[in-house]
Image: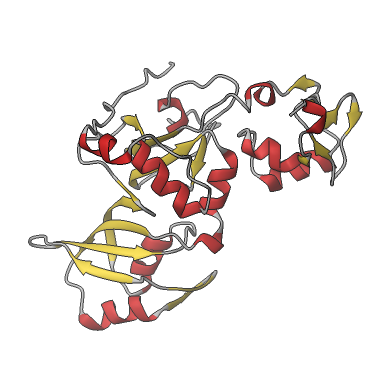
Amino acid sequence: MKPSEEPAERLQKVLAAAGLGSRREIETWISEGRITINGRTAVLGDRIRGVDRVSLDGRPVKALERSSETRRRVILYHKPEGELTTRNDPEGRPTVFEALPRLRGSRWVSVGRLDTNTSGLLIFTNDGALANKLMHPSSELEREYAVRVLGKVTDDQLAQLKRGIRLEDGMAKFDDIAEAGGEGANHWYNVILREGRNREVRRLWEAVGVTVSRLIRIRFGSLSLPRNLPRGAWRDATQEEMDALSADAGVPVAPSKSKAKSRAKLKLPKPRRTPRQH
């Protein structure tokens, strides 16, 4: 197919898929006149093809030049406590993006967030469209957390948490709560919910008078925190993990060679650490 015969796609969809930001962010940039197509200022509703030249703030968007060649990549990161899920912090505190490998022609997009005091699984991808679908409320993907609480929790409190509690931003509940051991004043529970509201797990426990002393995300959708992944380290997702995540998002799964054979020879990628810049 010639470039001129390629189907045109909405500008914000293409830029989001290239990892430049969410569709909503890009629509704002278009409204502000920051994006041009072939030298003219873009407007909402514009569509582009591979032959079109797109610039943001006067600089060519090089990610689009590679978009057809760039393979989808997903990495699993074990976020430690104390890191922020943001690209830059005015106070100079460490961020999760400092710990990730560098990309050429695209950027990492975080699938959801974890607050500073929460550790555990964070998923990153260079496919902005995949990330947006995974984070969209309609996906209703399960998030599972290991929670350590202080003191004894009553059956009535657990029933309240599963029945639903009105928080300042609406009703919230855990879809499931399971005891996970503990001694003395510290008790562990595994909880599951299908939303990604800010500090929702902590706020639910606090609403029934229980203090959370530690919080770890151990699963997002089909992907679990790998047991051999140290805090502060990352590894590439396996093909099976990529396929599971694509299925979670309702994205077509690329055909793979001899799945039975690949399972028999499955070798997990090694955990890695990225040197931080100081």
The residue at the point 37 percent across, 17 percent down is 275
The residue at the point 84 percent across, 43 percent down is 31
Q: Considering depth in this image, is 82 or 261 the residue closer to the camera?
A: 261
Res. 114 in view? no
Horizontally, residue 192 falls left or right of residue 263, namely right
Horizontally, residue 54 falls left or right of residue 237, namely right
Q: Quadrant of residue 191?
A: bottom left
Q: Quadrant of residue 38?
A: top right
Q: Residue furthest bottom?
A: 156
Res. 245 in view? yes
Q: Considering depth in this image, is 159 or 59 the residue closer to the camera?
A: 59
Residue 144 vertical placement versus 126 (above, below): below
Where does residue 12 sit, x and y in percent of width and height? 73, 42
Tell me the quarter of the image containing the N terminus. top right
Q: Considering depth in this image, is 41 or 171 the residue closer to the camera?
A: 41
Tell me the quarter of the image containing the C terminus. top left
Where does residue 100 sit, x and y in percent of width and height? 42, 27
Q: Residue furthest right?
A: 40
Q: How many marks?
A: 0
The residue at the point 55 percent across, 69 percent down is 169
Where does residue 28 sit, x and y in percent of width and height? 77, 44
Q: Quadrant of residue 199?
A: bottom left
Where does residue 212 sit, x and y in percent of width and height? 28, 59
